[in-house]
Image (cartoon, helix red, strand yellow):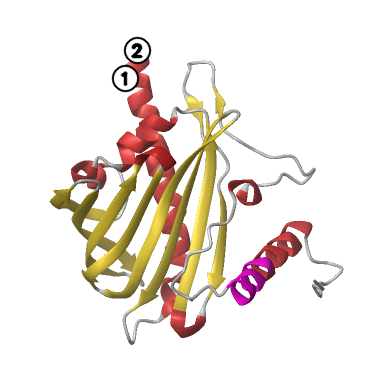
Amino acid sequence: MFVRTSRTEPKEIIKLRILFLKIRLLRSTTKLNDSDSVLISPKSLLRLRPDGSETASSVDGDGRFASSAIEQTMERMPMGVRRLAVQLRSPIPEQLFWDVLTDYENLSSFIPNLSSSELVTRSGNTVQLRQVGSQQLLGLRFSAQVLLELTEYRPEGLLRFHMLKGDFRRFEGTWRISRVPDGCSLVYELTVQGCIGMPIGLIEERLRDDLTSNLRAVEREANRRFQQQTS
């Protein structure tokens, strides 16, 4: 596989371009549809320092977990579709992350820009949530409502969701918790397509910021609960 790069291009950008080329190659050779998600491996999402070493969470002198570096990727798809993924590694126990992510009716209390989250129904490992989010764009406040269906795969540490009804043409993704030697890896992947007439370029940066802030919010809440358990 040949990747044309500029001599002045940072190594991290070159690696990112190669990563997206691998994703496109995978789709072309494995009969994947645009609706199929490609989950980038946690190791490939780890942030690299300039010297090539990886960053992760650490514990400070008070026993609290210091925030880990977050790596984010984005793939621009046809028809205004965006596929984004963010990942962090943390020494916080994976069960705490699972408890936070499945505390559906309290999500709006710690996730920014989520105005409300209501558990509508539950049947086995499948739940339906009605959520309302709000955003500030160009000095104006916008809101969007979605009815989501989530399927819980606890042994795999996987939460898969998709929109049943709402203000997007497409809104789906996964939360994945995986064990790693120093704790766990948390990956949030989202595929989104705005409604007709929605300027995707205008909200693209907001989407990227939201994924990072949502991941940070989940980490902070898990850390808060850990402190309560150990105090």
Marks 2 and 1, how far apart in space?
A: 5 Å
Residues 6 and 175: in front is 175
> What secondary structure characterizes most of the magenta part?
helix
For the C terminus, which image quadrant? top left
Residue 27 image offset from top left, x and y in percent: 59, 73
Q: Which residue is mark 1?
A: 228
Say which residue appears at 83% left-offset and 67% top-offset: 8
* Dot 2 crowding, Cα within 10 Å, few <14, some 14–19, many 20+: few
Left or right, residue 74 beside residue 122: right
Residue extending furthest toward the top:
231
On the image, the x and y values in percent for residue 196 come to: 32, 86
Which dot marks residue 178? Answer: none
Provide the residue span drawn in magenta. Answer: 22-30
- Which residue matches tag 2? 231
Q: Is residue 111 magenta?
A: no
- Give left or right: position of 219 versus 113: right
Is there CB contact under 8 Å for labels 2 and 1?
yes
